Image (cartoon, coloured by chain):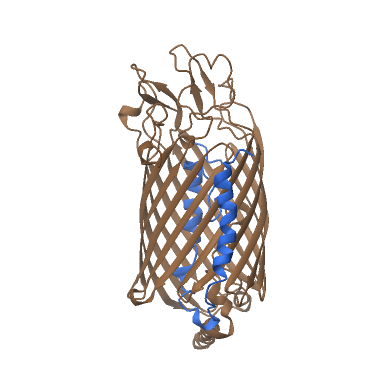
Chain colours: A brown, B blue
Amino acid sequence: MGGGESSRRTERERASGAESVARPSRALTALTTSALAVPGLALPARADSPVEQASSSYAFSYYLEDDLESDRLAPGGGSRERYEVLTHQLDFKLPVAKRVDVGVGFLYEEMSGASPWFVQPDTTGDKRLQVMSGATIEDERYDLSADLSYYMDESKDTFSAGFSKERDYFSVHGGLGTERSFADKNTTFSASGAFSYDWIEPTDADLFAERPSAGERWSVDLFTGLSQILSRASAVQGTINYKHSDGYLSDPYKAIRGFSSGDTVVSDRRPDQKDQLSLLLRYRHHFEPVTGSLHLDYRLYVDTWAVTSHTVELAWHQNLFGFLTIVPGVRYYSQSKADFYETLLLAGTVESTPGDRSSDYRLSPYGAISGKVKAEVALEDVLDYQPGGKLESIGFTGGLDLFVAFSYERYFSDGNFGLVSVGDEDEAPGLVNFQVFAVTLTGRF
Amino acid sequence: MRIRIRSSRLILSLPILFALAATGCAKVSPWERDLLARRDMSWEPDSLEAKRESHIYFSKEASMPGGSGGGGGCGCN
């Protein structure tokens, strides 16, 4: 073991020295990464140098929605219990050659619960009440994605691809991205393009006349971004995403009804095209005297369905005793409604087969506030071992560092939380509150 | 395209302002980047967490994720 430790220390020292002098690009690892909103191009948080050590992360999370409030549920409107999701994630990152590294990610999750179906008025006609899906939905999702990156001295090119499968849904995606650094790597430009193809086969299509038996859509996603070091302790990043989607964009499990008691319920129907544009600005600042880092993110989003949204996220990463990091964070979100969103259709419009319509709470005007706290413990050098030749060639250096993290998030949404006031006739009774518990275990080998 | 013109112009003009501002920054040498290299200074310190959150917000809100990839999936219900 001694020889292994020795060679490992040498490797560590080499890497450590490189970090400050010979390989300055290591210092940019976290800073020049383009954060891509494209499913096919979700580059990991690293930049223009290959990873030096193999690493693997496993996370388990439990997502739980609050029960629908009893005064928002329509009489006979189904179960108040909403969604819960159990998720397992597993990632690997390996340096497979001097200039090449690969990442592979698996995901498996189980979903169950009831979901909002359509809205109806109460007896006075003033208040909106939610009708939930009749049966408890049970589904599972598998997701596999991989990326391969090739590095040059001032650049990085990435290819990525993956798919996601549910009982009633299949999605495949792929993309290409590039990063170029300038000004001694103080500035990094990134750009990418990706496509995705989605296919849906709604369950129980034979039970609902208006529910399609199948639908498909494709999307093209373009991205560009710029990262800039501002000082020895601060950096800023700006990114723009444009996405065009074409095909079946409705939700087959949502419906809308007319205002009058005799009105029938008709299916959710959305435009078959959508253009989305988002701008994300991110700022990072480290305060050396207190060993803490500030994260500030702002996102502006607009689309051709008339939704505009603003998102602000603020987090503080406080390091304690060298091995513990506590991260409190808050997030604020506000969106306007889609131009075809209504809780109920006006009298008579059901019969006249109106155009696009949806009562989906996710297209309603509202705001959301969430808070999160995370604690991470870093346990370095917990195990020494002798890697074989093959393992050594893919980044196994002879030592094991462990990182264990616990996090909790609480999310509340409400029509009154938005930037613009919302009338009773527009506020969706199905707006969701949820919480997420998560534990993550990361090994660096 | 029916995207609101004012918002679109704002989104498209900000990178130019961003680039102009960046030209005024002091250059930081490679050996001065120890703080910038810290894990807690990365854009996304925890990639699994970023993917998970992105997928949740994608499923529950109307907006397109602005950060890391949301991954596939219906996002229905």
Of residues A152 and A339, which is closer to you in this image? A339
Q: Is residue A294 above or below residue A396?
A: above
Residue A45 at x, y percent in the picture: 54, 65
Residue A397 coordinates in the image, percent (x, y): 54, 78
Is residue A340 shown above or below A275? above
Which residue is rendered at x = 59% and y = 24% of the image?
A355
Residue in the picture at 51% in, 42% down: A308
The quadrant in which residue A113 appears is top left
Residue A335 % position (x, y): 46, 41
Q: Is residue A173 left or right of residue A322?
A: right
| In this rendering, position of residue A253 left or right of residue A101 | left
**Residue A126, image x and y in percent?**
35, 21
Left or right, B1 with respect to A230, comes to right
Q: Residue at x 58, y 85 (%)?
A: A22
Please say if A228 is above or below B7.
below
Report which quarter residue A91 is drawn in. Answer: bottom right
Residue A286 in the image: above or below residue A225: below
The front one of B5 and A109 is: B5
